Image: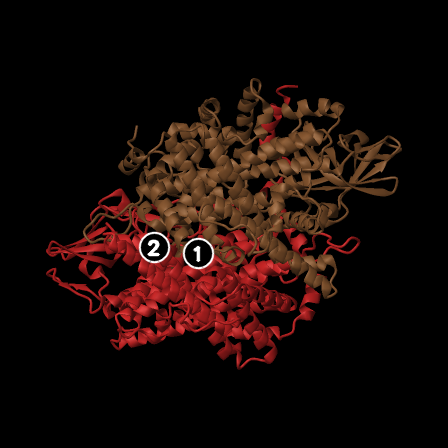
Chain colours: A red, B brown
């Protein structure tokens, strides 16, 4: 048993609230905390899941092989677990399954099997198809992945080139990859792991193209694992992160599959080749929106990981001597350090709260959808696009700030920052690239404003868009509620400005799309402002509602964090406030002062707050962030694990350095 | 011979200026271009320097061994080269030696030998010491590194714990590592490469501590390469980048070295232990300032690399279909894409121009220094601190934007972005962490303002600091010159605000340092504004001066780029402009319009501009950015090099997947 760093002990004594209460709040109830811990104990007790050599020292190939070994073990444990638990809650914003991060360190080669293949088989199939495939996928007889993106096409789904042409005589589809750019590219597990794949391809029947549809294709032999005839398959190579996820490419040389391998919950092709349309195209929105919703709570978790490391390290680390003769202060005492870290802690809470609100909204809207009510879908779509974009982008910035706040040690792989950052920055791109997402939301804003200006009724949540006149709009104030009003005025002002910009370009003779392009930098800004309205408003309202049932001490701290987030962004966007609201220079000064007060108020609770994230050392996997604060001891212990340290003299000395050194003697 | 992508051919035809003229301008003269190309040909023709397996697939240990092999080869080539060229120009802002990036891909284990060990032996020794050590270091009999930072101390030099205690009887210093936190940590090449090390330690003689001094210590046996007695040495482990540089740790158990191994150009210890002070402590500033100066031009080069890749890729990549029935546009046609990329191109030019100005200033000031004139040193120090901080930080942001602008493919190691980013983000921390640097500059600003307010004369370059009254200050205008004036008003306003904030806190009874800490978020902002003044003013003035001798066509393009940079930052900082200058909402709109005009004007020259950076494919090392634009072909070719693709079925299938799949059959 090693002792806890005395600075951390002192910090924990300062905390003004009950950390366990916070843990339960984050887990959404004590029963969920217990369930999470039970699963963590189950997984973390398996000693074969622990690496002797940290995986960053292995070769690319060894890392994959080790990942398959561990992921298979882990899957067996989870399989057993799911015999008594609900499989589907793996797709909900719970922290329970995050334990995988700890044992796998990088990402599982089964990620897409669990995260996309299985859900697709559940949600896009007929009952007969589901009955045949789902049990096989659950028991891993079928190891699957999901192939949509191609080498030459990502964002633009309609541009996909892979074809699936129906041959009515044989009752088969023929899958083909006509060009280099139409090779499927990216799917996790595709390279050497999966034996089945849901392939998105252009459906042709009776000489006509009906757009992209999903097909189930067997890609490897179940006995030998060799690629099936006509299938070209391999790994796409090394990446910034996700190096154990086994991303692959896939090409088809006229590969035949049965007609019934088209996933037919929505559209169908009959035996004779007749195409039967889906009831509504909007139904396929569902999964995409779901994944975007989950990214918001993913970001909350990654911010929790990063800020746990950075806050604990900043308490243990001492540096500089502002006052002669006095001891070096803990670096967390520097207000500039608090400025970098507390926003990360606050943002984690804000995203989690907003993410749960979005999750609930998603369920409400999709259950309406099942009743045939599609009215709220465009708004949900618009909200999920900008939230996905802004949350992933901001999280990646705050996490980088946490890393940089740990100086050189944050650059060590053993800090865990490089892993966290590689995962988070990928989410800015996947499932809808940042700018593309922002412009989707902007489309909604322009459409809504146009409706409103022409006197049509618009959804109440965006009614504020009509308040674009600075002098007439409701005034903002130096309070969280007032800042939300201010952000509404900004969103309205920027939306109207972009709208006018498009009109201006149209008047010069440009068509709408070219005018849109000319205004697009401003359109993205309007989307961002709209997104700030949603995040600030929802998290502030939800935080007030949710904290009602908490102790006053914890309630106070959580509201301080949400307020910090809101004021941080008011200051960041003061230019917009000065243009679009009645904010004055003095208001900026007052907000700055309140911001600094909040930093000081949060300061004594910093360690309690990150302890409240309750991320076990084995999951955090960080030399700098462990609960006991043995930072320097752990850095040295980890260093000694480098295989280069296994021998005092490396062979390259005799081979290259020695001849070199003596050449001129 | 493969053909060039037709989109790139078209782009090159659009270019309005002579690319070769730009190449010579960047190299600072045609003769330097020729010299650079000669060295590139020399190095790139050595086929042993080419990797068969890309280094990202090797294990950590293999990568080091491969790096030593290549670095030794490369060093031999350079050794020969230096027989007829000046060794010292390796320490100047020339692009000539960047060819190393290409062949080493990651960073050389000899980096610190060349970049710090050798310069220290040249600049901090007596003539006798230099005569003995420099030839050995140049011929690599002595392979060296430079150890200053410790596990527990980086920024705060005075806090270093390693001791060097003089024993007058033996005429020796005894080096000791009293604690875990005083292990030296980070020096490149220290782990398994160097046999000598300049060690910075607290000098004790006659029972008194005289602060940190540099000592030359032999750390490995020259015959066996085994660590010398009393020396504990090893690698610090895997990092975000720099994984071939062989960063090490080092501890001393009472290791004895001769008295004459103290580097004695400045301070000395006589045989009897008498300490002889250096003439001026400011003399040791020199090297630190020099390295910061070079970081500015380093960032210019890294931005050139990143923007070359992103611009060429954006010309080749087509995506989406804004207009039905029309072909998918090149993604560079999207104004949001131009917004991400052109600022990176512009910033590269701005940093290079500012860097050369700083380099010239550095030479002027240090030659005055040699004449005993120390007057301008504090200002140079302040300028170099904030420039180092702001340029490294902004470069890292723009480069990340370039990567993200390339979508998923930017995440591939083969794009080269992950390597560039790992190198650039490190520079935000090393040689002076961002916030620490900014606060150094802020110290200078506060001191200067205090002098000015008390009526003392201040250097003319910061005279604007007294113009902090918005209503009295010279008015800004919608021109580059006017924006510089605006930034001056902002710097003055923010400096005065931070000054007042400190005073306000002092009046509540806090001492100066605690008040400083309370105001530090605002102090960093003041520093940043001061830095923008310098960058915008110097690059605009220098660009006008330098372009006088260029063709009108090229001159126009370069001035457009500098203007783009200046307006970009005026818009980014519009909140400060609205508070501290007479800027109004309409001005913001006008600037936004001018900004978008500039994007449109630069658009046809985008490829010409990155061609003008003249980074050869072998040095760029990017599937996405090669001169011929064969993006998709290269991505596939590189993918096939993954060792996982050498066999169709990985062994893990038989070992782990198969038993798993059949378990439930």
Residue shown at 40%/48% (left/top)?
Answer: B340
Of residues B360 and B143, which is closer to you in this image? Answer: B360
In the image, farthest residue toward the top: B84
Label 1 secondary element: loop
Q: Give coordinates of residue A222: x percent, y percent.
A: 31, 54
The residue tagged 2 is: A520
Q: Residues within 10 Å of mark 2 (few under 14, many from 20)?
A: many
Residue shown at 43%/33% (left/top)?
Answer: B613
The residue tagged 1 is: A108
Label 2 secondary element: helix
Q: Earlier in the sequence, mark 2 or mark 1?
A: 1
Residue B374 lies left or right of residue A216; in this view the side is right
Up/down of B195 relative to A105, above or below: above
Instruction: Tell me the chain of label 1.
Output: A
Numbered disc total: 2
The N terminus of chain B - image quarter = top left
Camera-near label (2 vs 1) is: 2
Instruction: Tell me the chain of label 2.
Output: A
Tell me where residue A604 sits by quadrant.
bottom right
The C terminus of chain B - image quarter = bottom left
Res B168 label: none
């Amino acid at each position: 048993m090693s002792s806890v760093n005395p600075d951390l002990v002192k910090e924990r004594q300062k905390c003004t609230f009950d950390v366990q209460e916070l843990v339960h709040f984050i887990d959404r109830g004590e029963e969920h905390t217990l369930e999470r811990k039970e699963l963590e104990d189950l997984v973390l007790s398996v000693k074969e899941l622990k690496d002797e050599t940290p995986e960053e020292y292995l070769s690319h190939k060894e890392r994959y092989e080790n990942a398959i070994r561990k992921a298979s073990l882990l899957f067996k444990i989870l399989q057993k677990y799911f015999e008594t638990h609900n499989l589907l809650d793996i797709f909900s914003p719970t922290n329970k399954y995050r334990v995988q991060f700890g044992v796998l360190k990088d990402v599982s080669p089964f990620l897409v099997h669990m995260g996309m293949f299985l859900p697709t088989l559940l949600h896009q199939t007929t009952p007969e198809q589901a009955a045949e495939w789902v049990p096989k996928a659950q028991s891993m007889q079928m190891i699957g992945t999901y192939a949509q993106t191609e080498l030459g096409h990502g964002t633009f789904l309609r541009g996909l080139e892979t074809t699936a042409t129906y041959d009515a005589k044989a009752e088969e589809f023929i899958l083909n990859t006509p060009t280099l750019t139409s090779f499927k590219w990216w799917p996790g597990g595709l390279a050497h792991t999966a034996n089945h794949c849901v392939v998105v391809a252009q459906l042709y029947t009776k000489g006509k193209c009906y757009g992209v549809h999903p097909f189930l294709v067997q890609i490897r032999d179940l006995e030998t694992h060799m690629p099936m005839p006509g299938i070209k398959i391999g790994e796409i190579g090394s990446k910034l992160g996700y190096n154990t996820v086994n991303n692959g490419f896939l090409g088809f040389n006229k590969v035949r599959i049965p007609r019934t391998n088209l996933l037919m919950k929505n559209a169908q092709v009959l035996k004779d080749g007749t195409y039967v349309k889906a009831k509504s195209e909007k139904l396929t929105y569902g999964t995409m929106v779901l994944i975007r919703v989950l990214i918001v709570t993913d970001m909350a978790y990654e911010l929790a990981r990063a800020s746990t490391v950075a806050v604990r390290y900043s308490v243990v680390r001492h540096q500089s001597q502002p006052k002669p003769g006095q001891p070096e202060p803990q670096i967390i005492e520097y207000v500039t350090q608090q400025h970098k870290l507390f926003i990360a802690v606050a943002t984690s809470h804000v995203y989690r709260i907003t993410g749960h609100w979005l999750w609930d909204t998603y369920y409400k809207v999709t259950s309406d959808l099942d009743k045939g009510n599609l009215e709220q879908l465009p708004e949900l779509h618009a909200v999920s696009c900008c939230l996905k974009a802004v949350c992933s982008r901001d999280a990646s910035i705050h996490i980088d700030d946490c890393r940089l706040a740990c100086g050189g040690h944050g650059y060590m792989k053993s800090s865990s920052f490089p892993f966290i950052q590689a995962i988070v920055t990928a989410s800015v791109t996947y499932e809808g690239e940042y700018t593309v997402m922002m412009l989707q939301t902007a489309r909604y804003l322009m459409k809504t404003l146009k409706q409103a200006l022409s006197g049509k009724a618009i959804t109440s949540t965006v009614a504020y868009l009509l308040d674009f006149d600075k002098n007439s709009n409701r005034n903002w104030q130096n309070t969280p509620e007032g800042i939300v009003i201010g952000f509404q005025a900004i969103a309205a002002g920027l939306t109207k400005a972009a709208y006018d910009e498009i009109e201006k370009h149209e008047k010069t003779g440009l068509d709408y799309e070219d005018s849109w392009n000319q205004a697009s930098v401003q359109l993205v800004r309007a989307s961002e402002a709209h997104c700030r309205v949603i995040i600030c408003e929802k998290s502030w309202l939800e935080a007030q509602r949710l904290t009602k049932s908490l102790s006053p001490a914890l309630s106070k701290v959580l509201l301080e964090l949400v307020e910090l987030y809101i004021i941080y962004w008011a200051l960041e966007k003061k230019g917009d406030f000065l243009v679009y609201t009645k904010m004055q220079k003095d208001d900026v000064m007052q907000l700055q002062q309140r911001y600094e007060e909040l930093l000081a108020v949060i300061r004594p609770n910093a360690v309690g707050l990150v302890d409240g994230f309750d991320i076990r050392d084995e999951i955090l996997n960080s030399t700098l962030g462990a609960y006991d604060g043995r930072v320097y001891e752990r850095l040295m212990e980890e260093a000694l694990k480098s295989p280069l340290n296994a021998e005092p003299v490396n062979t390259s000395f005799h081979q290259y350095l020695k001849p070199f050194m003596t050449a001129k003697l």
